[in-house]
Image: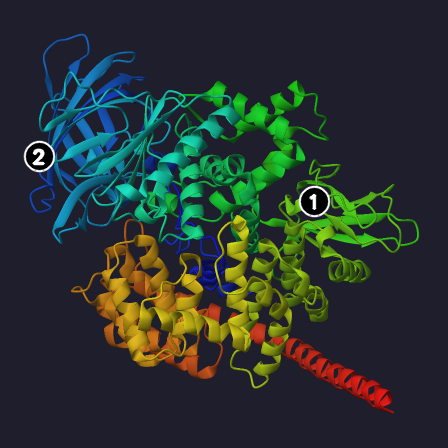
Amino acid sequence: MSRVHIYGAALLLTVLLAATSQAAVVRTFPPFERLLENPNARVAITPRADEDNYRLPNDTIPSHYAIELTTNVHNNGETKFTGIVTITLDVVTETNKIVIHARQLENFTASITRSTGGDSITVKPTYDNTDGREFLVLSFEDETFTLPADSTWLLTINYEGNLRTDNGGFYLSSYTDETGATKYLATTQFESTDARHAFPCYDEPSKRANFTITIKHDPTYNAISNMPIDEEKTTSGVTVFQTTVNMPSYLVAFIVSEFVYTEGELNGLPQRVFSRKGTEHEQEFALTNGMLVEKRLSDYFGVPFALPKLDQAGIPDFAAGAMENWGLATYREEYLLYNTENSTINTQTNIATVEAHEDAHMWFGDLVAIEWWSYLWLKEGFATLFENLAVDLAYPEWDIFQTFHAGSYQSALIYDASPNARPMTYFVQKPAEIALLYDSVSYAKAGSVLDMWRHALTNTVFQRGLHNYLTFNQYKAANESHLFDAIALAAREENHAVPALIVDMLASWTNQGGVPLLTVERNYNDGTFTIKQEAYTNDKDYESSKLWYIPFNFAIQSNPDFRNTEATHYLVKEAEISVNETGLTAADWLILNKQSTGYYRINYDSENWRLITEGLINRPHKISPRNRAQLISDLYRFATSGRVPHATLLNLLTYLPNEDQYAPWSAANTVITLFNRYLSGDSEYKNFQFFVRELVNQQFDKFGVNDLKGEQHLVKYTRNVLISIACLGGLESCLTDTTAKLQALVDDGTAIEPNLQSQVYCNGLKKASDDVFDFVYNKLMDSNDQAERRLLISALGCAGDANQLKKFVSSSIDESNGLRTQERYTLLSPTYSRGEVGLLTSIEFLLENWEKYGSLNAGFGGVNPLHSDIVSMSAYVVNDNQKEKLQELVDTVKGSEYVSDTLQASVDANVNANTEWLTENREPLMTWVSSYRAGSAALSTSIFALVLCLFTAKLL
C-alpha cells in the first residue's frame, strides 16, 4: 500500500515543515525538521497485547471462500449490503468452536456441513469485541460436539452490513459527472484489517485461501474484482468472477460502479485502467506505464506476473495513496490520471512511481505474503525500492534516484535520528498497533537499506537473491529469515565473498532501530584514515552500544570515480577500523559512500571538510550529485547539533552558484527553508536573505521562470526549487516574474505552464488582492482534477492576508462547498506552516470552531484532525506571542473527546525544542551571514575603487 507520495520542491517544502505528535520523544531537532510519512501514524504505540488474545487460534485454517454480496449502491448511494460467505476450512487440531474476524457486521446466521456431505449443523455466532479483538466465535449447541482433526468443513454465514463512509473496508464513494449529477459507487480498501468488514474471514496475512466472488448489483452498473469475469456464470446484474489463486484476505478487492476503461496488452498480459466517465483521455499514460513497468519487474525478478489480467482503478474518495489488491490495484485519481495538456511533471512522476510501487507488490506482498504485520517492511520496503528501480529501468533518462535521495532517503535519516526509533521488524498485535507501522521505517528506511545492500553486494547478487526468495516462497507467507537465506544462497551462487554471515549482516539493520554515524579521521602524513561508528541521534552527547555491519567504499580527489558502488570495505560490527593503501595525498579530498547509497551519515575532520568545500567550489561536477546533496544534508545536521561549527556548513553552501542538479538544490532548499522558518522574524533577517540571494541568483537567472519543451526530466524539478529559494530570498526578479504570470492568468486568461503553477500560485498569492485570491479559491472549488486541487490547496495557504486565509481555512467546515471529505482536514497545514500570519489565523479559527473541526471525518485509521493539527502547529511556534495564543487553544480543547491526554506534553515538547534551537543556533548563524554581507559589500567597494583608479589612470 502506498502512502501519499510527494516529489518536487514545492511539495517537499510542505512536508518538510509538517510535524508529528510523537513530539514527546526526547530530541534536539525541532519537529518540523522531520518528514511526516504516514498521516495516520501520529500517536505513540499502545502497550503490546497478549498474543493469545489478539491472534486467531490456529486450530482451523481456510482454503476457499465463496462470497456473494448484494448492493444497491446505485439507488442514491444506499449503504446497506447483504452477504453470504461459505468458507471451506481444514481442522488442524480438534476443536469445539471456530474463531474468525468480523467488523461492523450484524444479523449473523450460520451453519456447517462436512465437505464430504451430510446434514447441516446450526452454529451459534457470538461476537466478541473485548478490547477490540473483533472475534466472531462460532460454537455448537451441543457443547460436546467437536470438529475432529484432519477433517474439512463448509461453514456458511449470512450477514448484513453497511457501506462505510471513512474510505475503509467496503465503502461508499461518490463524484459529480459531466452533467452535474452525483454518482455513487461501492469500493474496497482492506489492508490491513478491513476485509472483515466486507465478509467474516480469517483476516491475517498468512492465512491464504482461494476466493470465488459473486456481486449482485443493478444492471446499469458494472463490477470488477481481482480476477476476470466468469462469462459462463455471469448474468445481467449478477457478476461472477473466476476463482483467485491462493492469497491473503486483505488483497481481495471489488468495485461496483459506472466506471469506464482503456485497455492494452503486452506480452500476453491484458491490462486495463478504470476511472469515472469523462476521464478516458487521462488514462493513457497510466496504461502505457503500467505495461512497461510490469515488463521491467517480471524481467528483473525472472518471475512472471501470476494472474491472467491486471487492472488499475482511480477512486474519487481514497484515503491511502494506492493499494496493491492482486490483479486490481486501486489509486487516488491524482496518482492514476494524467492530462497531457494540464498535468505537471510531478503528477507524471507520481503516477509512474506509485504504479510501480503497487506493481512491485504483486510479487512482494501478493505472490509472497508476510507472515505477520511485524514484517511489514518486507513488502513495503521492496515496493519503495522498486517504485524507483522499475521507473529507472523504464525511463533511465529521468535519473529518478535523485528524487529518491531527496525524498525517501532523507526522510528515513531524519526519522531514524530519534534514540527511540523502532527497528524495521517490530512486534505488533492490535489493529491500532498495526496501523502505526505504516511509517517511514517500513517504507523509506526499509527501501533505503535494501538499496544499500543492492549496491554493496552488487546488483547481480541482489537480483538473484530476490529471484530465489520469490520462487522458493511463492503462494506462501515469509519472514525476514527467508529473504536472508535467499540472498545468502545467491552470494554463494555468484561466488561473491562477504565478511560475515548474510543473516547477521542484514539482521543488524532490521532488528535494531536508528542510523549509524561514521566519523572519519585522516592521517595526512601517511594517507591512511580511521572510521568510527556509533548511533546517530540529534543529541551529540547521546551514548549507545549499537553496532552495525556497515558496507562502504570511497572516492578521492585524484581519482574521482563514483561509478562502482560495490562495497570495498566493511565495519564488521566493530566500533573502529583503519583503512590503508588509499592512494590519498594530503591535498586530496576524501568522500565515503559513493553515490550516497549507504544508509548512514558521515562526519569528517575539519581539514577534509575544507578540502571538500574547496573541491566543490572549484570543480563540483567531479563529485556525484547525490554525494553533493548528502554533504549538505549531513552538515546541516552536524552544525545544528553542535558537531561542527556553523561556518563549515555555510562555507560549503557558497559553492551553490555553480550547482545545476536537483538533489543538491533540494538539500539546500531544505536547509534554507528551515533556517528561514526560525529566522524570518529576526531583526537581522535581511542579512540572511542577502546570503540566500547570493547563492541562488546565478542559477535562477540560468533556469528562469519559463517551462521549455524538450528539457531533461529533472531540469523542471530544479527550476521549481530555484524559484522557491529565490522568492524566499526576496530576489526581485523572482517576485516580479511570478506575480506577473499569476496576474496575466487573472486578467487575460494567459495559462500558467503546468510545471510552474505551484511556484507561481504560491509566490503570486503572498501579496495578492482579494480579486486574485478569490480567483484561485474559486478555481479550487470548481476543479475536478485531484492533482490540481491538491496543488491549489497548498498554494492558497501561501496567502499573506489574514482575512483571505480566514476564508480559506473556514471552508474546511463548510459542508456546502465543493471540498471532498479527505480534503477538508488538509487546509490548515499549508496555512500554519507558511508563516506567522497563517499560524495565528489557524489558531484563531480553531478557537472559534474547534468542535466542528474535531468532528471532521479523519478517514480510516486516522487520528482526529483537531489533535494532529494542534500538535503540528506547535512545531511552528518560535516566539512568546505565538506560544501564548496556542496555549489558549490547548486550554480550550483539553479534556474534550477530540484530543488525547498527551496533547499538552506533545505541544510543550515541540515549543521547547524550538526555543532550544534558537538559543543554540541563532547567534552563530546571524553572525556569519552578517559578516558575509559586510565582506561582500567591502569587496564590492574595493572592486569599484580599483576600476575607478584604472579608469582615472587611463584618462591621465
Ranked by sequence position, the earlier of labels 1 and 2 is 2
Does the image show residue 895?
no
Q: Position of residue 520 (x, y in %)?
A: 77, 52
From where the camera sits, is residue 451 visible? yes
Q: Which residue is mark 1?
A: 594
Q: Is residue 486 above or below residue 906?
A: above
- Say which quarter of the image contains residue 434: top left
Q: State the quadrant of the N terminus.
A: top left
Disc 1 marks which amino acid?
Lys
In-front residue for pair 630/505: 630
Q: Position of residue 566 (x, y in %)?
A: 70, 35
* Label at residue 836: none
Where disc 1 sits, the SS reads helix
Crowd tier of the residue under label 2, counting other residues whose Cα lies within 10 Å: few below 14, some 14–19, many 20 or above: some
Q: Amino acid at mark 2?
A: Asp
**On the rendered image, what quadrant is the C terminus found in?**
bottom right
Q: Where does label 2 land, which residue?
A: 218
Q: Which sits in the foreground, 889 or 932? A: 932
Task: Work out how far the residue at label 1 is from the one at label 2, CA to CA, in angstroms.
Answer: 59 Å
Q: Residue furthest front?
A: 955
Residue at 59% x, 54% y: name it. Answer: 663
For the point 54% across and 21% down, which residue is it?
Answer: 468
Please tell me in which quadrant of the rendered image residue 493 appears.
top right
